[in-house]
Amino acid sequence: MRQTLLLRSIASSIRRGRAPREPSPPLCRSFAAAADQPDRKVAILGAAGGIGQPLSLLMKLNSLVSSLSLYDIAGTPGVAADVSHINTRAEVAGYAGEDQLGKALEGSDIVIIPAGVPRKPGMTRDDLFNINAGIVKSLCTAIAKYCPNALVNMISNPVNSTVPIAAEVFKKAGTYDERKLFGVTTLDVVRAKTFYAQKAKLPVEEVDVPVVGGHAGITILPLFSQATPASNDLTDEDIKALTKRTQDGGTEVVEAKAGKGSATLSMAYAGAIFADACLKGLNGVPDIVECSFVQSSITELPFFASKVRLGKNGVEEVLGLGSLSDYEKQGLENLKPELKSSIEKGIKFAREN
Ligand SMILES: NC(=O)C1=CN([C@@H]2O[C@H](COP(=O)(O)OP(=O)(O)OC[C@H]3O[C@@H](n4cnc5c(N)ncnc54)[C@H](O)[C@@H]3O)[C@@H](O)[C@H]2O)C=CC1
Ligand SMILES: O=C([O-])CC(=O)C(=O)O
């Protein structure tokens, strides 16, 4: 009841163009504002997995979604039946096995891909390449055939290589639109905000921290010099420690899970935030900005994560890096060789297979 009242108050505040009285998480905001929204189909590939299941739940809670299509090689009818009983707008359908992939994808506005194997302790994200590259390639081949205009949110690792693979597959199929392909790096932003807010003793809901580069180890470059609200209390050592913790955030979870996979719940949260931003952009909501790994010309690398403005066709503008501290400038130079080689590895794989 309290939730319903809060959502109504937020919806009417949005209609009146005023800020809601109580702070609210972004997922609730879109949940409330959707009564007169257009139909949008979202497909999740890998929907029965560790990320896929909670992400399916969160997307079912987002009433910007009218149709939720849950695909995996197995197990999706159960996930779909479960999620479909929730009292929100989206109609849910489960599809299992390759012969149902076309149906799962047809008419999709957004395809979210968390399909593939996760890390175990001692592995790098690049160690997943051999298995996940093939999975991503075959899923993207189907996307090019069945929903070539969809926005693609790539979660499967190594993101620094799977996004270039997807781009090559779409180029080969003649469907590539660089505005519609995104590597999901939102979890890096989610972590940077949490760690910064804790250290600077700020309420995390008010904090923002851009994270640029890529999505693996030192290629993850949080820009704490641009964090808002600014904090004057943090030393250079604090910034170094925060940077390292953000870069190692995935490994922290992999080690804590001790062989039972990598981040799933926080990733589902991050994936839902990013998909919500894409939906708002598609629906014409102005000034939707998120960090994402996209085709880019802001450095010499062909793909790079930075802030992007989202619109009716996906990426409307790739925003520049802004001014960097000397420490961040050094981090930027340090990450380029690794990111370049991961991008090239993806491109080579897609061209040769
Ligand atoms: N971008 C990011 O920030 C993050 C990315 N990840 C990545 O997300 C991926 C998934 O992680 P989890 O959900 O934890 O793994 P999981 O193993 O729990 O789930 C993966 C799912 O993909 C499915 N799958 C495998 N091949 C498929 C195919 N050809 N078509 C459709 N589905 C297929 C599996 O059946 C399984 O249900 C991993 O590669 C992981 O590294 C994880 C956390 C954060
Ligand atoms: O670390 C991993 O393997 C999963 C991931 O990408 C993350 O949690 O950032």
Image: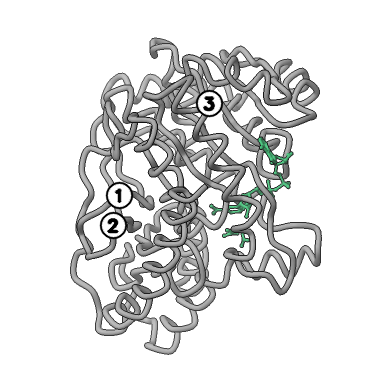
Which residue is located at x 29 percent, y 40 percent? 178
Element carrying mark 3: loop
Residues at marks 1 and 3, CA–CA distance in whole angstroms: 28 Å
Which residue is located at x 50 percent, y 35 percent? 140
* Number of marks present in the image shown: 3
Q: What residue is disc 3 on?
A: 62
Element carrying mark 2: loop
Q: What residue is disc 1 on?
A: 295
- Whether ligand 1 has any atom under 8 Å from the Cβ at mark 1 is answered as no
Q: Nearer the viewer, residue 329 or 57?
A: 329
Percent of width and height locating residue 306:
31, 56
In this picture, residue 305 sits left or right of residue 165: left
Kind of residue at badge 1: Gln
Q: Earlier in the sequence, mark 3 or mark 2?
A: 3
Q: What residue is disc 2 on?
A: 302
Image quarter hosting the N terminus: top right
Q: Quadrant of residue 230?
A: bottom left
The crowding category of the residue bearing disc 1, from other C-alpha atoms within 10 Å (few below 14, some 14 to 19, many at least 20), is: many
Q: Nearer the viewer, residue 22 or 15?
A: 15
The crowding category of the residue bearing disc 3, from other C-alpha atoms within 10 Å (few below 14, some 14 to 19, many at least 20), is: many
In this picture, residue 180 sits left or right of residue 91: left
Percent of width and height locating residue 90:
57, 15
Would you say the residues marked 2 and 1 are in contact, meaning their CB atoms lie under 8 Å apart? yes
Percent of width and height locating residue 269:
57, 44
